[in-house]
Amino acid sequence: MTLFFKSYQKHYTQKQADDCLAEAKRIITDKFSEESSRDLMQLILARERDFRNQIDSQRVVSRDASPESDRRATREAQQPYINAFYVFAKTLNDYFEAPELNPHALHVYTNSPYYLYVGKDSNHSYNSTDSKSKAALYSGILLTLLGLFLIPVNLPAALITIGIGITMLAPSAYYSTVITRSNENAVYAKEEELFAAAKALVASDSVATNDEDESPTETIGLK
């Protein structure tokens, strides 16, 4: 989904995202020891930093526009990333509140309509160029298909339509494959590592709990 259509989604606030992530951290701190959760907390802090940097980078400052116009433009530019930050925080929160009810948290998160891949900076995050490239790619595919359907009806019009479609397809397909997909895969690897660490932490705690529950029975059996 392009940033244009994402602008029409429900708007979450920065405070909602901050509060939700703070609650997720609180649950982790309450349930697990500092030592066992240290690696996961570092991964969460790294992702949080990436989100905040991306949100801050969307600030609009124009010499010609009024301050209110700049604030409005900033809100519009930041909103998709605030939504993505909120979904990240909410997924973590939901998982640690009830991990047995959310066994596929990463899949749920990355398939959310609010999801955007966010990397270490704007050049490695989903941005307007990715959005325009995706729109051009889909438009090129549609025009090419339309041209193919037009061949039996109007060959000259079909050839022109196919030519325009291919002209749009070539650069957009290159950008989507080489730039967008590469950045997306790098971010996904980080997120996969984070949610794998989350599952490992929950699993290790479950094993420890089971061992504690079984200890009295084993002791009685030895007497």
Image (cartoon, rainbow, N blue to C red):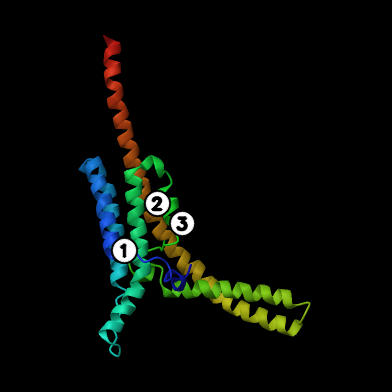
> Is 14 displayed left or right of 107 in the figure?
left
Q: SS at mark 2?
A: helix
Q: SS at mark 3?
A: loop
Sort mark 3 into few (<14), some (14-19) or many (20+) by Cα contacts within 10 Å. Answer: few
Q: Name the residue under label 2.
A: 192
Label 2 – label 1 distance at C-alpha? 16 Å
**Label located before the other in sequence (2 or 1):** 1
Farthest right residue in view: 152
Residue type, label 2:
Glu
Image location (x, y in percent) of residue 37: 26, 44
Q: Which of 63 and 71 is in front in this view?
A: 71
Q: Mark 3 points at which residue?
A: 111
Is residue 35 placed above or below 120 in the rendered structure? Answer: above
> Is 63 displayed left or right of 187 in the figure?
left
Q: Image point 35% across, 48% down: which residue?
A: 94
Image location (x, y in percent) of residue 105: 41, 49
Circle on res. 51: 1
| Residue 110 visible in the displayed image | yes
Q: Image point 54% across, 71% down: which residue?
A: 173
Q: Nearer the viewer, residue 30 or 50?
A: 30
